[in-house]
Image (cartoon, rainbow, N blue to C red):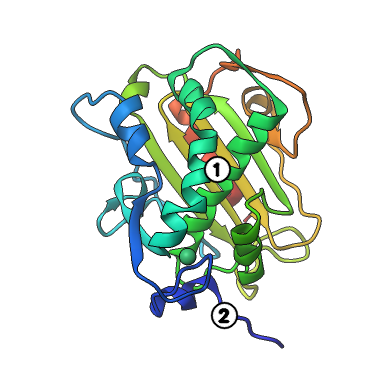
């Protein structure tokens, strides 16, 4: 079996997960400073984070870490050149539409914007995934490919929802789940980590990113959540009205964030 270096092996050597070059690394938040500083008004406590028990053996979760929750943690997995160069462009390009979404302003999200949001969300997912030791749902080739041409991953489904709770101005929450899914579609402990889900909720904007290295895998929500979480990748509609008429509650954000765990 061919063994390719996983993104996490590169971190140990202080090599950028995207360009693969050993260079000065930069520290960054998943929720960038422009969002925290200029969009979300500071209202005392900066985030609410949950402590849900999660003891299914084949799925790992990463909402809480030693140094506080993911939303406030800094990550050191990319070099300064990438961070200040093409990564900054991905961020800047999504910024106008993301600002509207985070603030819950009325807007029709067109296809170009759906792609920009999806690419931004994929970038955040890849940075998060690279920090988890042994994680291989997104392989080295996909990091290289994203570096040369940023775009949503293959076998990826991305959904957005309008967060409807009153605490939205101070709301920041990130969940990252890795799963080992076998051929039956159920979790299998002997399989490598091959599937991940990432959820980012900031202000009134909630995005859920599913991806898998299993060919042709596909993810969708059922019932109540399907009416609240709308697919933006693969792109299926020309314009998506924002805010989405049926918003998501904090409970629904949590339910959907951990949806991958119900496969087990
Ligand atoms: Zn780099």
Horizontal side, residue 192 vs residue 155: left or right: left
Q: Which mark is residue 101?
A: none
Q: Residue placed farthest to the right in the image?
A: 216
Q: Position of residue 31 (x, y in %)?
A: 39, 41
- Residue of label 1: 120
**In this view of the protein, which residue sits in the foreground, 260 or 12?**
12
| Cβ at disc 2 under 8 Å from ligand 1 | no
Image-quadrant location for residue 107: top right
Task: Identify the residue at image location x=66%, y=49%.
Answer: 151
- Residue of label 2: 5
Q: Name which of mark 1 and mark 2 comes first in the sequence.
A: 2
Horizontal side, residue 60 vs residue 212: left or right: left
Secondary element at image label 2? loop
Image-quadrant location for residue 22: bottom left
Task: Identify the residue at image location x=62%, y=66%.
Answer: 144
Vertical comparison of 251 with 55: above or below: above
């Amino acid at each position: 079996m061919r063994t390719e270096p996983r993104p996490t092996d590169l971190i140990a050597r202080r090599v950028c997960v995207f360009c693969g070059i050993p260079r000065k690394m930069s520290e960054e938040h998943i929720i960038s400073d422009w969002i925290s500083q200029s969009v979300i008004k500071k209202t005392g406590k900066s985030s609410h984070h949950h402590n849900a028990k999660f003891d299914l053996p084949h799925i790992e979760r990463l909402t809480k870490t030693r140094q506080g929750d993911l939303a406030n943690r800094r990550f050191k997995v990319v070099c300064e050149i990438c961070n200040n160069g093409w990564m900054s462009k991905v961020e800047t390009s999504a910024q106008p539409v993301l600002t509207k979404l985070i603030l819950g302003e009325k807007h029709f999200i067109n296809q170009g914007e759906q792609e920009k949001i999806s690419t931004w969300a994929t970038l955040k997912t890849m940075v998060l995934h690279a920090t988890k030791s042994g994680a291989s749902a997104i392989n080295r080739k996909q990091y290289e490919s994203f570096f040369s041409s940023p775009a949503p991953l293959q076998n990826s489904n991305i959904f957005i929802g309008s967060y409807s709770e009153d605490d939205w101005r101070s709301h920041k929450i990130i969940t990252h789940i890795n799963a080992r899914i076998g051929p039956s579609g159920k979790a299998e402990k002997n399989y490598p980590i091959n599937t991940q889900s990432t959820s980012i909720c900031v202000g009134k904007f909630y995005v859920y990113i599913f991806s898998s290295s299993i060919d042709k895998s596909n993810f969708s929500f059922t019932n109540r959540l399907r009416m609240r979480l709308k697919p933006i990748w693969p792109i299926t509609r020309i314009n998506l009205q924002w805010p989405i008429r049926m918003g998501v509650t904090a409970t629904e954000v949590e339910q959907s964030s951990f949806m991958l765990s119900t496969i087990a």
